[in-house]
Amino acid sequence: MIMKPIYTMSKVTPIQPPPEVTTPMPSLEKAEEEIRKEEEEVADQHETEEESEDTRQDDTDDDDDDDDDLEPPEFPPKEKGEDEGENEDAPEPPKEEESKYDPETQALIDEAKEAREQFKSADEKFRNVENEIRRLEDSLNTDFGPEEEFAALKDQCFEFTDREYTYKLCTFDKASQRPKSGGTETSLGRWGTWSGPDDHKYSHQKYEGGTACWNGPARSTVVNIHCGLQNELTAASEPSRCEYMFDFTTPAACQTRPPLEDTHEHIHTEL
């Protein structure tokens, strides 16, 4: 015998939905009345603020007028004692650093320092005098021509510029060149001697011992002296490697006529 399940259903009470609450809508006239009240309150507030601002402005103007009417206060003149008090408050100048040595040692140090300064000054003067003596000796030992006519060229320099270099001749001193575009100066020799032929010795100068060429001899320069109206370096060239040639004109190279008395004596003797 088969038993069938028996299902029992209990009676369920249905839940009732909550009642709807309806808020009554205000009437249109009441809403307009509230809006009108709010606008009146805002207008009253603006008027109150403007009145306050005007009141503050009037007070400020009155204060300015009162200030203009007031006279500046007069202060009594300062007395001498007060000025001295202010000076006393000013910062004092820094004091000198105290010596690290006792008075006797410091005195010896000061004497040694003064002696050192005196020696330095005397040594500088001695060197200047020594250099001047050497220069004078060089001048005395230099051959300026049979009548010293070339002595005026001493300590003078002249320049000539071509397409690439600027050449410089300091007569009885040195010859040099430097690139036209800029750069270091190259020595072309220092004063050596007159190198003209026996019958015209003072027509050429020789400058020797200049900067050595790359894998070559030291540079040297021969200066051809010509008669001219002014002292001028007129030409410069390098006819051979490391051997330069300058052309220089000077009135000192112009041969002078014999004195007029000697000419008359010569003519009288022939007669």
Image: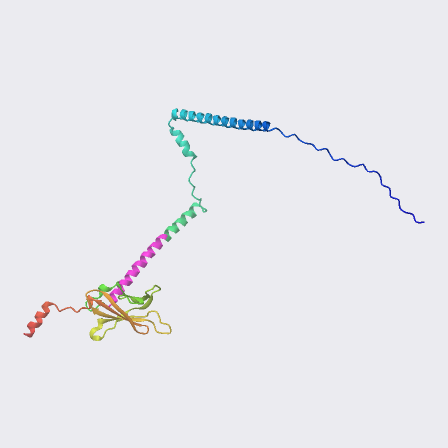
Where is residue 13, by image quadrant?
A: top right
> Image quadrant for the C terminus?
bottom left
Q: Is residue 13 magenta?
A: no
Point out residue 216 in the picture as x, y percentages from the top left corner.
Answer: 36, 74
Q: Position of residue 132 (x, y in %)?
A: 28, 60
Q: Residue 168 in the image: x percent, y percent?
A: 29, 65
Total residue callouts: 0
Q: How is the image coloured?
A: rainbow
Which sits in the foreground, 109 or 214? 214
Q: Is residue 104 above or below residue 153?
A: above
Which residue occupies 31% across, 58% down? 128
Quadrant housing residue 89? top left
Picture residue at 33% right of the left edge, 56% below the top = 124
Q: Is residue 186 visible?
A: yes
Q: Using the image as rendered, state which of residue 136 and residue 236 is in the foreground.
A: 236
Question: From the viewer's perspective, is 271 left or right of 121?
Answer: left
Magenta span: 117-143
Q: Is residue 148 visible?
A: no
> Is 105 positioned to the left or the right of 229 in the image?
right
**Residue 127 drawn at (x, y percent):** 32, 59
Question: Magenta stretch: residue 137 in it?
Answer: yes
Residue nearest the viewer, comparing 108 with 189: 189
Q: Give the residue furthest to the left.
A: 271
Magenta segment main secondary structure: helix
Q: Which residue is at the far right?
A: 1
**Image point 10% across, 67% down: which residue?**
260
Quadrant of the rendered image containing residue 159? bottom left
Instruction: State the residue at coordinates (7%, 72%).
Output: 267
